[in-house]
Image: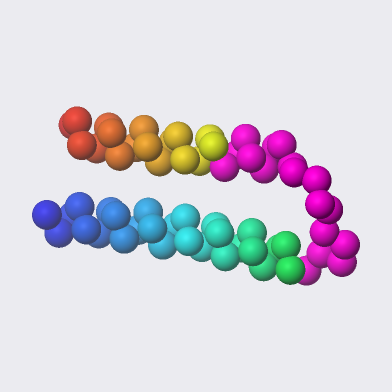
């Protein structure tokens, strides 16, 4: 059970660090665009699906 907690904490820390980098990068831009970036949305969906696949694999295995 402790290995499950450790893996969960590692994944949470990893994704939070990515989110913090993205947020910091957005603040440094001079003129942020109002248009929705399709590539960023696709990448976000891909990250979510990879995390979901990882969790399902972990639970099934």
From the viewer's perspective, tell me whether residue 58 is left or right of residue 37.
left
- Is the residue 25 above or below the residue 43 in the image? below
Which residue is located at x 18 percent, y 31 percent?
Answer: 61
From the viewer's perspective, tell me whether residue 29 is left or right of residue 16.
right
Q: Quadrant of residue 1?
A: bottom left
The colouring scheme, among rainbow, by chain, secondary structure or one colour, is rainbow
From the viewer's perspective, tell me whether residue 4 is left or right of residue 16.
left
Residue at the extreme right of the image, as rendered:
31
Residue at the extreme front of the image, as rendered:
34
Which residue is located at x 74 percent, y 68 percent?
Answer: 27
Q: Position of residue 8 (x, y in %)?
A: 29, 55
- Is the residue 34 above or below the residue 25 in the image? above
Which residue is located at x 18 percent, y 55 percent?
Answer: 3
> What segment carries the magenta color?
28-44
Q: Position of residue 5 (x, y in %)?
A: 22, 58
Residue at the extreme left of the image, as rendered:
1
């Amino acid at each position: 059970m402790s290995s499950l907690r450790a893996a969960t904490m590692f994944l949470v820390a990893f994704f939070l660090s990515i989110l913090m980098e993205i947020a910091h990068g957005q603040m440094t831009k001079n003129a942020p665009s109002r248009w929705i970036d399709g590539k960023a949305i696709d990448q976000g969906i891909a990250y979510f699906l990879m995390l979901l696949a990882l969790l399902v694999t972990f639970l099934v295995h």
